Image: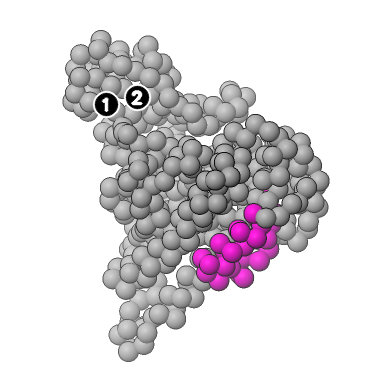
């Protein structure tokens, strides 16, 4: 999207002056801008994020920067990504109400979104590192993935509406290009921005010389690049979920695009597996096993919930052009075999994407705090090696992961391994 008014990045000092007459903000925070408490809290890779608190309440102001914040202005990035994040939030709110922050205001020229401040929610990844639990987490995540996948596809949408949406999101070029490079290519060669724990050298060399592995990764990449089944969050992980002890919300869909139904599910599971493998670096022996088993339960229940909710939607909301009742129920035929075939394909693809994400978060540019906060590099490397080798197995044998139990058993097996 073209910027028609001169863009200027906000600061904590200028925000109240520049946004002080914005009714959608003052109505929620208060009109006395001199009393606003403004804190810049952006700890992600791309954006400015401010908490604005006043006499009436609070809000979040999020503004895109014209570069990748993690790297600096040597890596420019278009401001229009804020537009696509806004559009994604609107669609997610419609497809699974109550699971994303409410939007109060959007300014395309300033690449700026004013939205609900989620409090006392905190980033889920931080909770997993700290050993905290969240009630209902698996149900929330599995349901979110199923509803957004199903309702954003031609299983549910009118084909004309879906094709219009695909055309709209096709304009988001540079942001998906980051995924295409950092996720599917960079981990498997010595890319400029890659980095990894030094003790992993032999394992990394083994992966990069595995032609069968790289071939399968590129097959999955080809599927990702050419498949527009549904609108995906595009970067769904434990850092893009905020939770309390009993409630969760999904944030930051700026990598949204139309892609495979399996992608978000695979990325999400990968980040829980990394949380699982990293736990010996964060827990004492007396709490380790129990908490790791809780994480595995979240993985298992998320997968089961996804399939259960997808099945419910299949039976109640299958109104699009795909798998129409005219070919099945109206002729007295069950559509359940077709559903099972589709779910099997989604699960197989998700396991492959899961393995790739496990690799890129250890070898590419943006790593996970799950591992990065383990200060002893020898300990960190041994745990990352388990993660890398299970990722390889998932990529190469994704069709052998027939259910959640198989995946969990495999994780327990790799958690006992020594690969250095």
Q: Nearer the viewer, residue 336 or 372?
A: 372
Question: The N terminus is located in which quarter?
Answer: top left
Q: Residues within 10 Å of mark 1 (few under 14, many from 20)?
A: many
Residue 318's place in the image compared with 41, above or below, is below
Which of the two discs, 2 and 1, labels the residue nearer the N terminus?
Answer: 2
Q: Nearer the viewer, residue 320 or 28?
A: 28
Q: Write down the quadrant of residue 196 in the picture.
A: top right
Q: Nearer the viewer, residue 297 or 221?
A: 297
Q: Write down the quadrant of residue 35 in the picture.
A: top left
- SS category of the residue bearing label 1: strand
**Residue depicted at x 20% and y 13%:** 32
Magenta span covers which residues?
388-415
Q: Nearer the viewer, residue 189 or 228?
A: 189
Rendered location of residue 292, percent (x, y): 53, 51
Q: Residues within 10 Å of mark 2 (few under 14, many from 20)?
A: many
Label the magenta part by its dominant secondary structure. Answer: helix
Residue 108's place in the image compared with 90, above or below, is above
**Residue depicted at x 35% and y 76%:** 324
Q: Determine whether label 2 and label 1 are within 8 Å by CB.
A: yes
- Give the colour scheme of this rendering: one colour
Residue 361 located left or right of residue 234: right
**Residue depicted at x 49% and y 75%:** 341
- SS category of the residue bearing label 2: strand
Name of the residue lying farthest toward the bottom: 332
**Residue depicted at x 75% and y 61%:** 212
Rendered location of residue 265, percent (x, y): 48, 56
Q: Write down the quadrant of residue 225 in the picture.
A: bottom right
Residue 136's place in the image compared with 368, above or below, is below
From the image, tell me which residue sits under label 1.
58
Rendered location of residue 61, percent (x, y): 35, 27
The circle on residue 51 is 2
Compute the Cα span from label 2 to label 1.
7 Å
């Amino acid at each position: 999207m073209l910027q028609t008014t001169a863009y200027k990045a906000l600061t904590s000092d200028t925000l109240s002056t520049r946004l002080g007459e914005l009714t959608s903000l003052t109505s929620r925070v208060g009109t006395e801008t001199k009393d606003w408490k403004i804190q810049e809290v952006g700890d992600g890779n791309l954006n400015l994020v401010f908490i604005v608190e006043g006499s009436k309440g609070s809000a979040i102001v999020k503004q895109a920067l014209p570069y990748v914040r993690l790297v600096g202005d040597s890596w420019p990035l278009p401001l229009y990504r804020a537009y696509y994040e806004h559009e994604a939030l609107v669609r997610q709110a419609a497809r699974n109400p109550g699971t994303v922050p409410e939007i109060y205001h959007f300014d395309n020229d300033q690449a700026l979104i004013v939205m609900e401040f989620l409090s006392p929610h905190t980033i889920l990844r931080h909770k997993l590192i700290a050993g905290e639990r969240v009630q209902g987490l698996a149900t929330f995540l599995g349901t979110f993935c199923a509803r957004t996948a199903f309702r954003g596809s031609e299983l549910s949408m009118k084909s004309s509406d879906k094709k219009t949406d695909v055309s709209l999101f096709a304009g988001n070029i540079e942001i998906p290009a980051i995924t295409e490079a950092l996720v599917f290519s960079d981990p498997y060669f010595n890319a400029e921005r890659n980095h990894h724990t030094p003790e992993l050298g032999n394992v990394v060399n083994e992966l990069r010389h595995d032609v069968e592995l790289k071939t399968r990764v590129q097959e999955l990449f080809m599927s990702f690049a050419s498949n527009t089944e549904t609108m995906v969050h595009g970067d769904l992980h434990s850092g893009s979920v905020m939770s309390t002890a009993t409630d969760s919300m999904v944030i930051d869909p700026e990598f949204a695009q139309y892609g495979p139904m399996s992608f978000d599910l695979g990325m999400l599971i990968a980040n829980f597996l990394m949380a699982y493998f990293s736990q010996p670096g964060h827990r004492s022996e007396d709490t380790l096993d129990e908490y790791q088993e809780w994480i595995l339960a979240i993985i298992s229940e998320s997968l089961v919930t996804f399939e259960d909710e997808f099945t419910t939607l299949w039976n109640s909301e299958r109104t699009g052009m795909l798998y129409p009742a005219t070919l099945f129920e109206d002729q007295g035929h069950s559509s359940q075999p077709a559903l099972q075939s589709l779910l099997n394909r989604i699960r197989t693809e998700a396991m492959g994407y899961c393995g790739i994400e496990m690799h890129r978060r250890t070898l590419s540019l943006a790593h996970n705090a799950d591992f990065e906060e383990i200060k002893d590099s020898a300990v960190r490397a041994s745990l990352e090696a388990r993660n890398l080798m299970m990722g390889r197995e998932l990529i190469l044998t994704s069709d052998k992961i027939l259910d959640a139990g198989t995946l969990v058993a495999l994780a327990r097996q790799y958690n006992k391994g020594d690969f250095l």
